[in-house]
Amino acid sequence: DLITTSHYTICSSFPLPCPAGCRKTVKRGDMSHHLATCEEELIACEYLQIGCDSVIKRKDLNKHLQDEKEGHLEKAMKNISMMNTVVAKICLKESPGPEPPFRHWLCSKPSCYPLPPLIIKMDNFDNMKKQNTEWYSAPF
């Protein structure tokens, strides 16, 4: 009958098979909680934000993280390098558009982390020193 059929489609206690395929039967009202911990549920890699687009079963996550350790490190280093380039462009005022309001904060080094001394070779050092001009280097 109609009442019974509609009740089964909305009843929070109605048992349903897990859609992830773990073969458990779960109450409709508990399904979201179950899927949040189900070992068969497909999840994105923890390193999605740095470029790993792998989708794996929750039970296989640790194996994926172990197997892809070097790949994740390479992706992280690539992202850090790109961010350093962006920061350098902002500090050197090479980025297009208006100056970001956080530029001063971004470009000033914290006093508790001094930079190591740098040894560099500069062409026309004496002339530039005499002219008292600022020196810039392209990011590398």
Image (cartoon, rainbow, N blue to C red):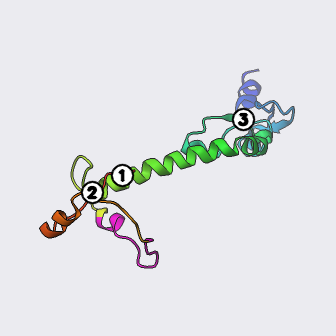
The label on residue 139 is 1
Quarter of the rendering containing residue 61? top right
Disc 3 residue type (three-letter) = Ile
Residue found farthest to the top: 1
The label on residue 56 is 3
Circle nearer the viewer, 3 or 1: 1
- Magenta-drawn segment: 104-116
Disc 2 residue type (three-letter) = Leu
Nearer to us in this view, 98 or 90: 90
Residue 126, can we see it? Answer: yes
Q: Residues within 10 Å of mark 3 (few under 14, many from 20)?
A: some
Q: Position of residue 62 (x, y in %)?
A: 77, 45
Q: Left or right: 64 with respect to 95?
A: right
The label on residue 92 is 2
**Distance between mark 1 and mark 2 Cα atoms:** 9 Å
Quarter of the rendering containing residue 39? top right
Q: Residue at x 77, y 43 (%)?
A: 34
Q: Residues within 10 Å of mark 1 (few under 14, many from 20)?
A: few
